Amino acid sequence: MPSSQRRTGADACPGALDVHRAADGGLARVRVPGGWLRADQLHRLADLAVDLGDGALELTSRANLQLRGLAEGAEVELGAELAAIGLLPSRTHEKVRNIMASPLGPGDLVAELDAAVCAESDLAALPGRFLFALDSGAGDVAWSGADLAALPVGDRVALLIGGIDHGVRVAPDQVVPAMVACAKAFLQVRGEQWRIVELPDPGVIAATLSDYVATLADTAATLVDTAATLSDTAARLVDTAATLSDSAATSANSLGQAGPLSGLRGPGIAVTAERVMPGTPPTGGPIGPVVFADGGLGVGAAVPLGRLTADQARALGDVVITPWRGVVVRGELPEIGLITDPTAAGIGVTACAGRPHCHKALADVRAAALAVSVPGRAVHWAGCARRCGRPAGDVLDVVATTDGYLVDGRAIPGERVTEAVAQGRQD
């Protein structure tokens, strides 16, 4: 989308309570910060998919989950159930808890950022498409189109704003406050834009932080001057207060030596000339044996077309949902039909709901996607030009039209699309 594009109409991004009415019923999107799900949460979601929806859980390109086929009003029961298992901590902020994280990373900041966002009443006004990303340093989510991304650089953390490094560097313990401050700044300067990249000048967010840092520097300088004055005064008092008790004299000497700034912590935020070279967002997540940041062993797997059946979900324990419509588990992965071979044809294949699930779709793109048995380049099948669910990165673009498909912009008759996509995946 071109930068500075102005939106028309309200943000219709679905949530768990504010569902989208699709051709096959209600569509509810459940935010899963960092993609982390306990086994009990996943199993209850599987039950809800059967009881309220079409029996499956859809994985999204932001590591969230969706339930489809909901009856009118089913979102009331769904919301209550989600709250009971800790997946709906805030009704006012439920659509803005969009937090991606490196699936093999420590994830220590995910809960902190989630809590901080929910604690700020102003941030409930963020558009449902606004995205935070916490990268472990692997570079796997930092460049995936997040509005605000944290990427460790040495002993500091680069704060990427609108996908660009503006030189903002923060201490590790200041990542969450800095991201919250930037999100607030976006709300102050936005018009009808939903994303930072759509602002006429996304750098205005970094400029706001720069002004903040300059103000802190001025304040610190003033405090230093004040400290020097107090120190001089304390020294004079110590010299002339011969009649004071020993304890009072000791206190005065302590004031003169240490100064009132001795325990003051800096803001941990700076705007520098340093820049990180932009990375390329990966088009696939962890597949096969993996090692977590803490040294633990596990397995990564792709979920065919991002649809996890209720039985598959119930067979899993604690999981991390990945932004590539896959899962990562610790230990062994049960044999339940997930893809663990990185050379398999199903790796990197995604699709929107298509017909008959979506009113706007022009083809059954899921069925078409499954007909291609050639591995290779990542490919996304879209039932219309909106390209819902398209992942970031270098992806073969397949879009249904009224008279066939567009494959990377080239018109292809419907009967030849399987061949064209197979060739495109190999090119």
Image (cartoon, grey):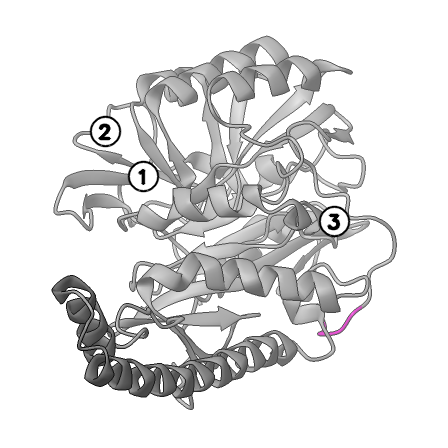
Marks 1/3 in contact by CB < 8 Å: the verdict is no
**Residue under the image location 80 percent in, 51 percent down:** 403
* Quadrant where the C terminus is found in the figure: bottom left
Which label lies toward us, 1 or 3?
1
| Magenta residues, start to end | 1-5
**Residue 333, label in figure:** 2
Other residues around mark 1 within 10 Å, as few (<14) / some (14–19) / many (≥20): many
Above or below, comparing residue 226 to residue 30 in the picture:
below
Above or below, comparing residue 413 to residue 47 in the picture:
below
Marks 1/2 in contact by CB < 8 Å: the verdict is yes
For the residues marked 1 and 2, what is the alpha-carbon distance in whole angstroms? 9 Å
Which residue in the protein does label 3 denote?
384
Residue at far top of view: 51
Residue 400 in percent (x, y) is at: 71, 50
First along the sequence among labels 3 and 2: 2
For the residues marked 3 and 2, what is the alpha-carbon distance in whole angstroms? 35 Å
- Name the residue nearer the viewer: 210 or 357: 210
Residue at far bottom of view: 273
